[in-house]
Image (cartoon, helix red, strand yellow):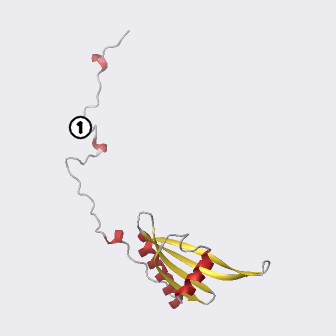
Amino acid sequence: MEELEKKDKEQSTGHTNDQVREEIFSRTVRAGKRTYFFDVKATRSNEYYLTITESKRRFNNDQGKFFYEKHKLFLYKEDFEKFANGLNDVIEFIQTGKEPEEPVKVEELETVTPAPVPDPHTDIDFEDLGKDVDTSFDDSSVETKE
């Protein structure tokens, strides 16, 4: 069975395992006319990521041959949780017809900082400026250049 899955995958991707990055772990899911491949691979820096490949066997009438149409999705470790949450939400909606509750965001859970209490030493009201200053002006003491 494992050999059949490898051959199916090789035909659907057009590559042998020697031509692509070595797979760390793999699962194949057959679902009707489609086959899904879940492959864990590693980057050059040895970070794991997931490729999800949908493969559909199609027939080309012009050439009279079967071929595999494929679609790939690359999912990196830092996105796993958000991807899984989104996937679970839409699956739940499809199964129940009800929208799942929006999760409370971490930012919303943080305590609200109270408004600062004004310090009387730094609380300045500019409208008070000039009220206690003598605004009369004696220009006799100003020298002018003639």
Name the residue furthest right: 62
Q: Position of residue 36 (x, y in %)?
A: 56, 82
In this rendering, would 72 be left or right of 141? right
Q: Position of residue 125 (x, y in %)?
A: 28, 46
State the quadrant of the C terminus.
Answer: top left
Crowd band around label 1 with a 10 angstrom C-alpha radius: few (<14), some (14–19), many (20+): few
Q: Position of residue 142 (x, y in %)?
A: 30, 17
**Residue topped by disc 1:** 132
**Residue drawn at (23%, 47%), measured in percent from left and top?**
122
Q: What amino acid is at disc 1?
A: Asp
State the quadrant of the N terminus.
Answer: bottom right
Which element is circle 1 on?
loop
In this rendering, would 128 be left or right of 48? left
State the residue in front, 106 or 54. 54
State the residue in front, 17 or 137. 17
The answer to whether residue 80 is above or below residue 145 is below
